[in-house]
């Protein structure tokens, strides 16, 4: 009985799974925003990564990485867009 309880306590909750998918989506969208209209995608990626960080304590490391990746991609995406005179919108 106690082994079954510990297995249930270690199982991922639906919030953990959704937070992981949101963080992964934010990382992918931030990478895409480096080459395609950074001001359209990067605010969305920052919001998605912050929501995933607030949703789950288990996916905290992935969500923290997503926040950092979104911030770094924002900096480099805007820099690339300005240097090569691409459209921001």
Image (cartoon, rainbow, N blue to C red):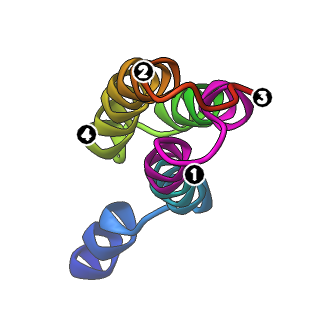
- From the image, tell me which residue sits under label 2: 83
Disc 3 target residue: 89
Q: Residue drawn at (28%, 37%), measured in percent from left and top?
A: 65
Give the mark nearer the N terminus: 3 vs 4.
4
CA gap between label 4 and label 2 equals: 33 Å
Q: Position of residue 85 (x, y in %)?
A: 56, 25
Graded by Cα atoms within 10 Å as few (under 14), some (14 to 19) or many (20 or more), the crowding at tag 3 reads: few
Quadrant housing the N terminus: bottom left
Observer-nearest residue: 18 or 36?
36
Expressed as whole percent of the image width and height from the top left, the position of residue 79 reads 40, 19
35 sits to left or right of 36: left
The quarter holding residue 18 reads: bottom right
Q: Which residue is mark 1?
A: 22
Upstream in sequence: badge 2 or badge 1: 1
Cα gap from disc 4 to disc 1, whole angstroms: 13 Å
Q: CA distance from mark 3 to mark 4?
A: 31 Å
- In this rendering, the answer to whether 72 lies above or below 52 is above
- Most common SS among magenta residues: helix
Task: Tell me if residue 40 comes above or below residue 10 in the rendering.
Answer: above
Kindly indicate whether the residue at mark 3 contacts the one at mark 1 (C-beta within 8 angstroms).
no
Q: How much space separates mark 2 and mark 3, taking CA atoms?
A: 15 Å
Q: At which x and y percent is residue 41?
A: 67, 37
- Depicted 76 relative to depicted 62: above or below: above
- The mark nearer the N terminus, 4 or 1, is 1
Q: Residues within 10 Å of mark 1 (few under 14, many from 20)?
A: many
Tell me if residue 29 is in the magenta stretch: yes
Q: Which residue is mark 4?
A: 61
Q: Is residue 50 left or right of residue 88?
A: left
Q: Write the start and end of the magenta stretch as one range.
A: 26-44
Task: Classify residue 55 by image quadrant.
Answer: top right
């Amino acid at each position: 009985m106690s082994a079954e309880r510990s297995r249930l306590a270690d199982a991922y909750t639906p919030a953990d799974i959704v937070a992981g998918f949101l963080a992964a989506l934010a990382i992918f969208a931030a990478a895409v925003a480096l080459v395609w209209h950074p001001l359209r995608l990067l605010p969305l990626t920052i919001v998605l990564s912050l929501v995933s960080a607030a949703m789950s304590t288990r996916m905290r490391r992935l969500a923290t990485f997503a926040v950092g990746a979104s911030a770094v991609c924002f900096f480099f995406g805007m820099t690339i867009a300005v240097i090569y005179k691409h459209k921001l919108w």
